[in-house]
Image (tube, rainbow, N blue to C red):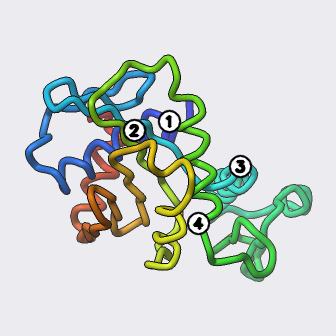
Amino acid sequence: MNKYDKHYFERYARLTLYCGFPKWKDHFVRSERPDLQNEIDGVGIEVTSSTPSHIREVEAFGQKILGKTVSGADEKRFRGDLFLTSERVAFAYSPIKGLEDSDKSPEIISAISHKRDIWEGYKEFNVRGVYIFTGTSIIDEEMLEKVEKSEAFSYFQLVFINAMDKMYYYQNGWKKKEFTDEELVEFKKKALAGE
């Protein structure tokens, strides 16, 4: 099992929610359909990623070879860009080759639309939410505006967009919660420990 599996991200999302909404502390449980359920406050949240699966696969492979000597076969297998020392040790990588479009709104909108489309049959809550890991810190107001104008957006009363060191959330307008380095380290440690 990968230590960064689906449950890791659900636990991580729950920890960041507590930081932004302390009143929810200990109210959410990890479940299925939706992933995070808060019976006390009537909130159900589905957790997902807006990063395309092929990029997640390349990132996982990159993490495995980072700091290791890379064979010619592994270098060919890697579909992104590898940065190697003269001794062929991977010191950095990019999951893509060349420039990538920095506008992440299409991927975020696609993730929201997908969760809206599969929500049928889920346990009903007064408040439906979706929590999206973007894998980037490059989120701006223009992107948030595009996301808000998307057709599927109105299906959810709460939308959370995790942008690494900050979380944008929509609840009657966009708000932002920034996380300190200490909080980020604590989130990761607790999520890996299964808390």
Q: Nearer the viewer, mark 2 or mark 4?
A: 4
Position of residue 30 relative to residue 153, above or below, is: above
Residue highlighted by disc 1: 6
Position of residue 69 relative to residue 51, above or below, is: below
Residue highlighted by disc 2: 10
Local crowd at mark 3 within 10 Å, few (<14), some, or many (≥20)?
Answer: some
Point out the tag, 1 or 4, that comes first from the N-terminus: 1
Q: Do the residues bearing badges 1 and 2 touch, measured as CB atoms within 8 Å? A: yes
Q: In whole angstroms, how far apart are the C-alphas of marks 1 and 4?
A: 22 Å
Which image quarter: residue 75? bottom right
Which image quarter: residue 66? bottom right
> For the residue marked with disc 4, what is the amino acid?
Ser
Residue highlighted by disc 4: 105
Q: In whole angstroms, how far apart are the C-alphas of marks 4 and 3?
A: 21 Å
Point out the tag, 3 or 1, that comes first from the N-terminus: 1
Point out the tag, 2 or 3, that comes first from the N-terminus: 2
Residue 57 badge: 3
Q: In whole angstroms, how far apart are the C-alphas of marks 3 and 1?
A: 14 Å
Q: Nearer the viewer, mark 4 or mark 3?
A: 4
Q: Secondary structure at mark 4?
A: helix
Image coordinates for residue 48, horizontal then vertical, percent: 51, 43
Q: In whole angstroms, how far apart are the C-alphas of marks 2 and 4?
A: 22 Å
The answer to which of 8 and 109 lies nearer the viewer is 109
The residue located at (25%, 49%) in the rendering is 17
Position of residue 88 relative to residue 36, above or below, is: below
Image coordinates for residue 121, horizontal then vertical, percent: 50, 17
The N terminus lies in which quarter of the figure?
Answer: top right
